[in-house]
Image: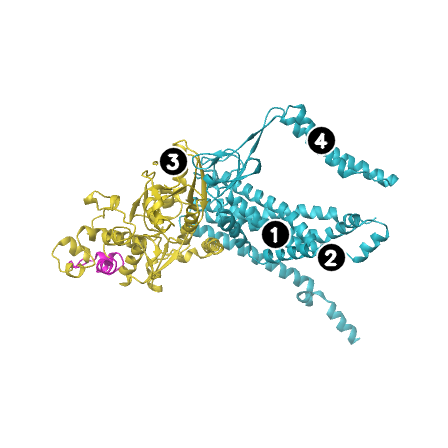
Amino acid sequence: MKKQILTGVFGAAMLTVAASAASAATLDDVKAKGFVQCGVSTGLAGFSAPNDKGEWSGLDVDLCRAVASAIFDDPNAAKFSPLSAKERFTALQSGEVDMLPRNTTWTISRDTALGLNFRAVNYYDGQGFMINKKNLPDITSALQLSGAAVCVQAGTTTELNLADYFKANNMQYNPVVFEKLEEVNAAYDSGRCDVYTTDQSGLYGIRLTLKNPDDHMVLPEIISKEPLGPAVRQGDDQWFDIVSWTHFAMVAAEELGVTSANVEEMKSSANPDIKRLLGTEEGGKLGENLGLTNDWVVRIIKHVGNYGEAFERNVGSGSNLKISRGLNALWTKGGLQYAPPIR
Amino acid sequence: MASTDISGDRGSASASWFYDPKVRGIVYQVLVFAGLVALVWWITSNTIENLHRANIASGYDFLNSRAGFDIGQTPVDYTSDSTYGRAFIIGMINTVIVAFAGVLTATIVGFLVGLGRLSHNWLIRKICMVYVEIFRNIPPLLVIFFWYFGVLSVLPQPRDSVDLPLGAFLNNRGIFLPRAVWGEGAGLIAIAILVAIVAIFLVRRWAWQRQMATGQPFPVLWTSVGLLIGLPLLAFIVTGFPLTWDIPELGRFNLRGGLQVKPEFLSLYLALSFYTAAFIAEIVRAGILGVAKGQTEASYALGLRPGQTSRLVIVPQAMRIVIPPLTSQYLNLTKNSSLAIAIGYPDLVAVGGTVLNQTGQAIEVVVIWMVVYLGLSLGTSLFMNWFNAKMALVER
């Protein structure tokens, strides 16, 4: 705990004297040190958590590994800093991390007043509620929650949405606020509060870590828009482009049917869209314009896979979470995942 | 002739001002001060420039914007529509509440344990020693965790609350006490209490003067107790018993009504009190042992009984040794209350952390934290210095 506070304060101190170094071209810094430093959550299943081998894995982690692959052709040229909700922005602003793929909601105030930039959204989420249905069998809707004690993580958009939702529906509640996710989980699991609220994807992940997952139920209401995406510092457009287009390239690859299994044979495809994407087009230099090599997408797909593969592996049917694509399906399949043209 | 020449040369100021220790001292001080000012100026301007370059908004304007989040314990009015500034005030009040309650309990427990360590009874002496050695040698954070996870979070769910006497309940949401609801005329009772306090002061002064003049003692203690209980009781009867109790009862989620003391506050309060009490006990023991044995013997020789000896001779002298280190313990307790963040008690640091994250104003928030804790500590020090001066030996 103390260490966490220290990191925050130390980050603020770094900001006072050392921020000048961080505003230089991030890509050059990253190349010089040989790895990408990514700020991730302190452990959210499906997005960023250490797996049974002790390696970081998840949808957010894969985005970081994709950026590392595009630059170094090596998905392991990425290091991860677990950050609490409170520390995350200071860590990014002060240059402690290069990018922040940390299930962070894109809002206008974060985009402007915090000096950050958001563009790609790698998971469209919404806030939900989870209750213990064994203790509260007669509750079927969030509108019945007046008077409840609600567990929530400090300093999140969740905390704000919660206040707005209960106020708008004229209901009372008793906030029980912790700084770290594990503390919120423990408090909910021990019965300190009746309700757990966070992004719905998070609720499904957290449910699996509780003592008796089957006792708990996620209520149907979604009370907010939570577009989660990687944040970078303002003022370095090249790095901003690399991070955003890495995500877009993964989406475009899924759209064009390029997967980690078939990327090598797709290199000889005659389809002009695929040729542009994979950098096999005659005289094309889309990758070089980004400051990378022309085969940057090949590297990403080879090591990490396309967006659909990453989704299914981490949060979808290939994982314990079994979340359906829903809003995160491709735009051609009724979802919101849409990549601008790569040309 | 030659020798006078030499001494004349030595005395001339123009040759030796550089070697004059006074002048050098001033020069060095001016240089150090200028260096310090330059350093502060450099850090400040560099920070402002870097914040500007990183496009981060700065300044304290954010304190007037809507906070948008709720706080678990609000001693004064606060809703999500209040400002960030008000959220800080709530956090500060919560810090003061837990620090004040902690200081009070730690002092009482500490004095009892400290006296217990000097008891003639073997069992009491050893129990107090074990207590001191355990709590003094465990980090305060672990003591907080012990109370929060070890004691309070294993209590039953609200449905299976433990019934305590007098309509109180205990469960993993805290302690629920009946709340006193005062009816009409309750103001008279408050006035009666005030009158009693003033009367006690007057009686004490009169009794002291009388004892100085005639040597006759007066039972001040019993008179005071009588006044403090009798007057409010009289007011209570006269106004027709204007008191009802709001007793907590089970609602859908939790007990409703009554007065809820939350587990976050309880564990922090208990942990800080018991942790600091161990140190205070040692300070008190040192203070009492620090009074020379001859004082006790002289007092007995004058014919004072053991109770009077400790009350009139030992304790007043021990207090002079005890108060200065006691101040440090009070400051420690206040600062340790920032460990509240580990269990989610909404103190200044916890609320400030939320504000920091919602607004991103890291430097501003850290400055507020530092200024408030500095203010609280200096305030405590000032009070304790005043108290110390009052308790100091008055020579006649």
Residue depth check, mark 4 versus mark 3: number of the one nearer the observer: 4
For label 1, count other residues whose C-alpha is less than 10 Å away and answer few (under 14), some (14-19) or many (20+): many
Which numbered disc, 4 or 2, marks the residue that appears first in the sequence? 4
Residue type at mark 1: give it: Thr
The one of B4 and B62 positioned closer to us in this rendering: B62
Q: Image check: B299 left or right of A83?
A: right
Q: Image check: B179 left or right of B288?
A: left
What residue sits right under mark 2 in the picture?
Answer: B289
- Asked whether the residues under the numbered discs 1 and 3 touch, taking CB atoms below 8 Å apart as contact, a structural biologist would say no
Counting from the top left corner in percent of width and height, residue A220 is at 31, 39
User: Which shade of the palette goes to chain A?
Assistant: yellow
For label 3, count other residues whose C-alpha is less than 10 Å away and answer few (under 14), some (14-19) or many (20+): some
Query: In the rendered view, would you say B294 is above or below A326?
Result: below
The one of A235 and A50 positioned closer to us in this rendering: A50
Disc 2 to disc 1, how far (Cα)? 20 Å
Residue depth check, mark 1 versus mark 4: number of the one nearer the observer: 4
Question: Which chain's residue wears label 4?
Answer: B
Query: In the rendered view, would you say B85 is above or below A170?
Result: below
Residue type at mark 3: give it: Tyr
What residue sits right under mark 1 in the picture?
Answer: B276
User: Which shade of the palette goes to chain B?
Assistant: cyan
Residue type at mark 2: give it: Leu
Disc 4 to disc 3, how far (Cα)? 52 Å
